[in-house]
Image (spheres, helix red, strand yellow):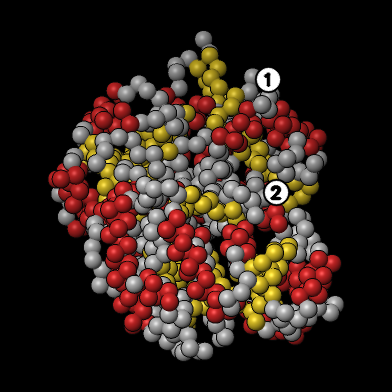
């Protein structure tokens, strides 16, 4: 099943067919984790009325991603590593148990997702970030992204100093050295904007051979009021950069990346899907309606992360629209769920809006 | 240091610390006797003004308005008088320094009013960002002081990292600090004027005890009424007030009484929705995370998370529940008998709200535990109603001194 979903082009399945195939896999994973992960079994028993066989992917139980900060959920007795990752440094990290099998699935999924964009060869890689972002323990989301994309590149070059100053000479030398051959650039959206676009806004830099993959940092972009369309247009006009791919992913489902299509919308590849839920009732939202994003994926085998409710918000804008042969759901990620400050007698209990 | 003093209509004027010190010293030498008619009338007048206010007022401010009505103040004064030991007269203590909590900011009004009625001079340190509602109440009092030519009451502001707290403490005979442990620690080292006393309102937690039999026997209207009272205890300050309960201890057993408790919780969710409560999506998800984590750990055997207002967990264990999430989150624990509460209470526990027990049973259990904790037993629905006996203090007596006359 997983192989079949992986071998087909990433967005080739119509929604109906995709849901049918995913549902069988998700039911299987739900049963597997129920049997292998005692924490998960207790949650299903206490919160979901026990293990069931679900008739639609909307009915498959989900866990809120914040739970991975509270508990180390494991479905494996074998050798494994625990990935620790936090959105920003200083936050309580999520702990994700990854065994060799799940790791292989993640890698295969990433390759299947990015091959149509990057081709089969490893391209020279320019990270719009500092080498220091790759800390060995407790990776930030930024570090995890750079590390993941490095697998697709050859000889990584870092564009920023440890204090996030743009190393202009390094960038110019790197671009010049490619001599018109394609190369890969990756960075957080906000860093690409402030450290590449704004730094080289006045100079000549030809990035027509670059493939830019970027992600995250939406909040700071929103503060600067730079919508995605404007971001793309600005890079095209300034650098002749047209191959631009935003993606959405998160540590609790590493390997499942929703990549931007030609219409600027994000597409979950065949082995994943997304459900938008209305806060409070947690019922699926209507087409176009904003809500919290739930993601399902066939990748997580060593931890029960195959169906998770994120703290991101978004909307489904099209289903099976066929843009450049992309089918399934097309979504826009709109932000983070809101957290107002709670009052309290004590001066130390106040919770602030999530970062 | 940037010290300002509040005037009418939100006016704020810089004042030198030396000037404030001089005025406090003058005020200390012109105190009035406890529960003077003049001060009682002034406070009652403000109460009337609050209750007659044309603008919408929150329920806790409304409660304050009722609490300072003339009739209530006269009852308070009579009670104080009756309890005064024979061959004594009471006198104010002097200058009282009030440091309100940052969040549930109106709670300090009660201790401040009691100190004012006790005849003291008062200085209140307001935070930089007080609500419009609290500013409005301060305005009413400031206007009344001006009319009565009372120059002994001050509302001030100064930066927290300044010398303000130290200098004002040195001029104060009593200091009342509301807030968490860190805040109390910060004030502990600041000496008061010779012989001064400190009153602390620190971090507290609260709980509720229900008779499972009585809950199960409720009819629809009674259940609805109880749900409204629980709402008042839990939802008014986002469940973050010290006296808001986080756990319902139900005397009985799950097999017999859980259905009744669930019906009550469902009604509570409906009442909360009717009364316009709402939580940010992030809080709803945080509640879901905590409920699921509680299930994962094996503590809860059942969690209810699909109600937008209220998330709840049920455990089979007969032990204290320490999970405090807030914004509509209740743990349900079954206990074999009312007196089991004494084994559950911790030092920091403040209010035990109760439903379904005879007053004698409550008195017996409250009287039988000698361990610290459990400073207040009060019926469900009155958790947030301030009382002059609070956190173990009898405030009118704490804020006055007795003079032996033989």
**Which comes sooner in the sequence, label 2 or label 1?**
2
Q: Nearer the viewer, residue A29 or B354?
A: A29
In the picture as drawn, the residue positioned furthest to the front comes out as A121
**What chain does mark 1 sit on?**
B
User: Viewer-proximal residue, A253 or B204?
Assistant: A253
Please tell me in which quadrant of the rendered image residue B167 appears. top right
Query: Which secondary structure, mark 2?
Result: strand
Residue B232 location in percent, x, y? Answer: 37, 51
- Image check: A355 left or right of A155? left
Which residue is depicted at the point 61% across and 49% down?
Answer: A136
Q: Position of residue A60 (x, y in %)?
A: 31, 66
Q: Which mark is residue B194?
A: 1
Between B357 and B52, the one lying in front of the other is: B357
Residue at x 53%, y 13% (from the top left corner):
B405
Q: Secondary structure at mark 1?
A: loop
Q: Which mark is residue B6?
A: 2
Chain for numbered disc 2: B
User: Which picture quadrant has residue A168?
Assistant: bottom right
Q: Is residue B332 visible?
A: no
What mark, if any, has residue B285 been given in the picture? none
- How many numbered discs, if any? 2
Vertical order, A312 against A211 (above or below): above
Residue sticking out furthest to the top: B406
- Confirm whether residue A179 shows in the render: yes
> Considering only vertical position in the picture, is B45 above or below B112?
below
In the image, what residue occupies the spot 65% across and 82% down? A243
Gap between marks 2 and 1 measured at Cα: 28 Å
Q: Pointer 2: residues within 10 angstroms few (<14), some, or many (20+)? A: many
């Amino acid at each position: 099943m997983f192989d079949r979903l992986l071998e087909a082009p990433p967005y080739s399945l119509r929604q109906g067919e995709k849901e049918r195939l995913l549902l069988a896999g998700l039911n299987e994973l739900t049963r597997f984790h129920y049997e292998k992960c005692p924490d998960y079994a207790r949650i299903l028993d206490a919160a979901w009325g026990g293990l069931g066989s679900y008739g639609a992917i909307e009915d498959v139980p989900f866990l809120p991603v914040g739970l991975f900060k509270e508990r180390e959920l494991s479905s494996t007795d074998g050798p494994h590593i625990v990935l620790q990752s936090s959105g920003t440094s200083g936050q309580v990290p999520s702990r994700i148990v990854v065994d060799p099998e799940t790791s292989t699935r993640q890698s295969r999924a990433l390759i299947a997702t990015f091959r149509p964009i990057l081709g089969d060869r490893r391209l020279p890689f320019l990270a719009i970030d500092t080498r220091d972002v790759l800390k060995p323990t407790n990776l930030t989301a930024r570090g995890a992204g750079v590390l993941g994309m490095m697998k697709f590149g050859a000889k990584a070059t870092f564009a920023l100093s440890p204090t996030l100053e743009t190393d202009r000479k390094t960038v110019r030398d790197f671009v010049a050295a490619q001599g018109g051959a394609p190369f890969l650039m990756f960075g957080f959206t906000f860093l690409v904007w402030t450290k590449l676009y704004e730094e080289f806004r006045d100079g000549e830099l030809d990035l027509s051979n670059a493939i830019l993959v970027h992600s995250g940092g939406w909040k700071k972009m929103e503060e600067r009021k730079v919508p995605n369309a404007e971001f793309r247009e600005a890079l095209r006009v300034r650098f002749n950069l047209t191959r631009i791919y935003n993606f959405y992913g998160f540590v609790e489902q590493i390997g499942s990346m929703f990549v931007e299509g030609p219409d600027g919308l994000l597409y979950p590849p065949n082995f994943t899907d997304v459900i938008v839920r209305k806060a409070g009732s947690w019922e699926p939202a209507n087409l176009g309606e904003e809500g919290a994003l739930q993601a399902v994926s066939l990748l997580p085998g060593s931890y029960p992360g195959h169906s998770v409710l994120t703290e991101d918000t978004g909307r489904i804008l099209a289903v099976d629209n066929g843009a450049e042969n992309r089918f399934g759901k097309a979504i826009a990620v709109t932000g983070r769920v809101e957290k107002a400050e709670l009052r309290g007698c004590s001066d130390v209990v106040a919770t602030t809006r999530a970062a | 240091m940037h010290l300002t003093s509040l005037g009418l209509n939100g006016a704020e004027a810089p004042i030198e610390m030396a000037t404030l010190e001089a005025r406090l010293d003058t005020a200390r030498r012109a105190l009035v006797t406890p529960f003077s008619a003049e001060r009682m009338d002034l406070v009652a007048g403000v109460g009337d003004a609050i209750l007659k206010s044309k603008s919408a007022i929150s329920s806790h401010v409304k409660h304050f308005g009722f609490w300072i009505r003339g009739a209530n103040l006269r009852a308070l004064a009579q009670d104080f008088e009756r309890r005064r030991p024979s061959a004594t007269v009471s006198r104010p203590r002097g200058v009282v320094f009030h440091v309100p909590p940052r969040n549930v900011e109106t709670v300090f009004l009660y201790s401040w009013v009691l100190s004012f009625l006790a005849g003291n001079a008062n200085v209140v340190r307001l935070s930089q960002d007080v609500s419009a509602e609290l500013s409005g109440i301060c305005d009413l009092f400031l206007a009344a002081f001006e009319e009565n030519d009372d120059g002994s009451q001050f509302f001030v502001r100064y930066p927290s990292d300044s010398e303000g707290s130290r200098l004002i403490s040195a001029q104060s005979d009593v200091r009342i600090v509301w807030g968490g442990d860190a805040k109390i620690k910060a004030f502990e080292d600041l000496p008061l004027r010779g012989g001064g006393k400190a009153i602390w309102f620190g971090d507290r937690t609260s709980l509720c005890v229900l008779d499972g039999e009585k809950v199960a026997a409720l009819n629809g209207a009674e259940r609805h009424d109880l749900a409204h009272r629980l709402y008042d205890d839990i939802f008014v300050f986002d469940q973050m007030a010290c006296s808001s309960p986080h756990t319902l201890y139900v005397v009985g057993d799950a097999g017999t009484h859980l259905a009744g408790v669930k019906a009550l919780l469902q009604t509570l969710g409906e009442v909360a929705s009717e009364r316009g409560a709402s939580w940010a999506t992030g809080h709803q998800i945080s509640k879901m995370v905590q409920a699921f984590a509680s299930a994962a750990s094996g503590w809860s055997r059942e969690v209810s998370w699909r109600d937008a207002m209220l998330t709840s967990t049920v455990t089979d264990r007969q032990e204290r529940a320490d999970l405090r999430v807030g914004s509509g989150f209740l743990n349900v624990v079954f206990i074999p008998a009312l007196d089991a509460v004494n084994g559950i209470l911790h030092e920091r526990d403040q209010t035990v709200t109760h439903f379904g027990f005879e007053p004698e049973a409550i008195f017996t259990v409250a009287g039988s535990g000698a361990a610290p904790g459990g400073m207040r037993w009060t019926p469900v629905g009155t958790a947030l109603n301030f009382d002059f006996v609070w956190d173990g203090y009898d405030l009118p007596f704490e804020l006055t001194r007795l003079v032996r006359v033989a």
